[in-house]
Structure formats: structure tokens, C-alpha cells
Image (spheres, rainbow, N blue to C red):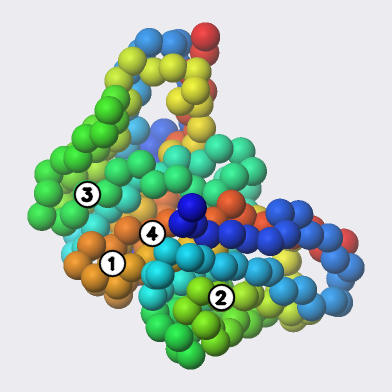
């Protein structure tokens, strides 16, 4: 059974600092990996999707890397802003076409 | 606008009552999913459906039931058999082609007292 771990569970940084969020998974036979953002009491918003054949994906200040062989992905957020405060979830698509989620990293960016 | 709608946003029920949560999508996606989210935990899959008139149990299906009579709709019933029904419920959908990407609705917070 796929296990997805996100470290750290919570992170607090001053505005302007770069954020590094880690995700690890136990079964490297994945189809895709998705990073999501969740604001309190809201649904999930897809940030980035990395296909298993890709090494990284970028969107604006966000960059996500994928090392399938070691079972790791990292989400980088450059020059953080208070509006980046949220919970970030990593999820991997298995070959059974289901997502397995990590518990998330809750980020607070202090103004 | 294309998207996923869930209603209601907040739902309150007495213990012992069944309750049905609505999920509708106009993205023309084949697959739909129901998740449960509890504080401090990741999302857990309740049921999923890859096509109309077919659905499979997820990791925590006990006490829940679903139907998929239309492509656009995937309602979830929380029955009185569910021991701890108070939670945040999220519906999602995805296409079934070479790139799987999941999209989520805004969620329904169910409180059972």
C-alpha cells in the first residue's frame, strides 16, 4: 500500500523567504504526482502535476521536482508572501488510478 | 464556468439519520471520487466511480453508499451505520486519458450530534 509522508508538518517563515516542502512515497511505481493547496475550510486547488517521465514542473513562483527512483518530490515556492499561507498536500497517482495523499504541510508566512 | 459543485456547504444531522451529500460536475469527466478529511489527517478515499453505473469501494467505505446514474452526478449517502460521520467531505473528478489530474469541489462539512 502506498504511503505518502510530508515533512515538516508545519512551517513558519518571514515574508520573502523561499519555501521548501518535502514529500516522500514508498512505492515508486507511480503514474503522476500532484501538489495541491488547501485554504482553511475549502476544497483543494491543483498547483502542479508532474508526470512520471518528468523531472520537474514550474508555474510562476512554484517549482516542483520529482525523483521517482528515490520516492521523493520537493515543492519550492520562491519569495514567499502572506497569501501563500495555506496547507500544501502532495498526492501520488498509482497504477490503480487512485490518489494517495500525504497529511500536508501547513505554511504560515509572516508579514 | 466549468467545475464541481457540492451542496450544501454545511450540514447538521442528528445521530441515527441518513444524510445525502450532493456532487455535480460539468467538466465532462468520466471518473468521480469521494474523500473524507479529518483534522490533521490526509484525505481518505471512500468510494470512486470510473464510469456511469459502476463504482468501487475505497479505503473507508463502511457506513457509506453511492450511486452513479449520470455522468455528471455522484451523490454520497452517509448512513447511520457510520460510527464517526462528523468530518469534511470532498468530491473530486478526473478525466480518463493519458494524463490523470484530479479536480476538487469546495467540500461539505457534516456535523452529526
Q: What residue is shown at x 24% (from left), y 58% (from top)?
A: A32
* In this picture, residue B61 sits left or right of residue A27: right
The residue wearing badge 2 is B74
Q: Can marks 4 and 2 be said to lie on one chain? A: yes
Please tell me if label 1 and label 2 are on a single chain.
no
Measure how far apart labels 3 and 2 are at the Cα level: 27 Å
Q: Tell me the element at label 4.
A: strand
The residue beneath circle 4 is B102
Q: Nearer the viewer, residue A3 or A95?
A: A95
Mark 4 and mark 2 lie on one chain; the one further toward the N terminus is 2
Which of discs 3 and 1 lies nearer the camera? The answer is: 3
Q: Residues within 10 Å of mark 3 (few under 14, many from 20)?
A: many
Figure quadrant of residue A105? top left
Where is residue A28 shown, x and y percent of the image? 19, 59
Residue that badge 3 annotates? A50
Do tag 4 and tag 3 residues touch (Cβ < 8 Å)?
no
Mark 4 surroundings: few (<14), some (14-19) or many (≥20) residues within 10 A: many
For disc 1, the chain is A
SS class of the residue under badge 1? Answer: strand
The answer to whether dots 3 and 2 both sit on one chain is no
Task: Report the residue at 79% width, 78% height from top.
Answer: B18
Please tell me if label 4 and label 1 are on a single chain. Answer: no
Label 2's element?
Answer: loop
| Disc 1: which residue | A94
Amino acid at each position: 500500500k502506498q504511503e505518502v509522508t510530508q515533512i515538516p508538518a508545519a512551517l513558519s517563515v518571514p515574508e520573502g523567504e523561499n519555501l521548501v516542502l518535502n514529500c516522500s512515497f514508498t512505492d515508486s511505481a507511480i503514474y503522476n504526482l500532484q501538489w495541491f493547496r488547501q485554504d482553511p475550510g475549502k476544497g483543494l486547488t491543483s498547483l502542479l502535476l508532474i508526470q512520471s517521465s518528468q523531472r520537474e514542473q514550474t508555474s510562476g513562483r512554484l517549482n516542483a521536482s520529482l525523483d521517482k527512483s528515490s520516492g521523493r518530490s520537493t515543492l519550492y515556492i520562491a519569495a514567499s508572501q502572506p497569501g501563500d499561507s495555506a496547507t500544501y498536500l502532495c498526492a501520488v497517482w498509482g497504477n490503480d488510478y487512485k490518489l494517495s495523499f500525504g497529511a500536508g504541510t501547513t505554511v504560515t508566512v509572516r508579514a | 464556468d466549468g467545475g464541481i459543485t457540492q451542496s450544501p456547504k454545511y450540514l447538521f444531522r442528528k445521530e441515527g439519520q441518513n444524510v445525502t451529500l450532493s456532487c455535480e460536475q460539468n467538466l465532462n469527466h468520466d471518473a468521480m471520487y469521494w474523500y473524507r478529511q479529518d483534522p490533521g489527517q490526509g484525505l481518505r478515499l471512500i468510494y470512486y466511480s470510473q464510469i456511469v453505473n459502476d463504482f468501487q469501494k475505497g479505503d473507508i467505505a463502511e457506513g457509506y453508499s453511492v450511486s452513479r446514474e449520470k455522468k455528471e452526478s455522484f451523490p454520497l449517502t452517509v448512513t447511520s451505520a457510520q460510527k464517526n460521520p462528523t468530518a469534511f467531505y470532498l468530491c473530486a473528478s478526473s478525466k480518463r486519458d493519458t494524463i490523470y489530474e484530479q479536480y476538487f469541489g469546495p467540500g461539505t462539512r457534516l456535523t452529526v450530534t
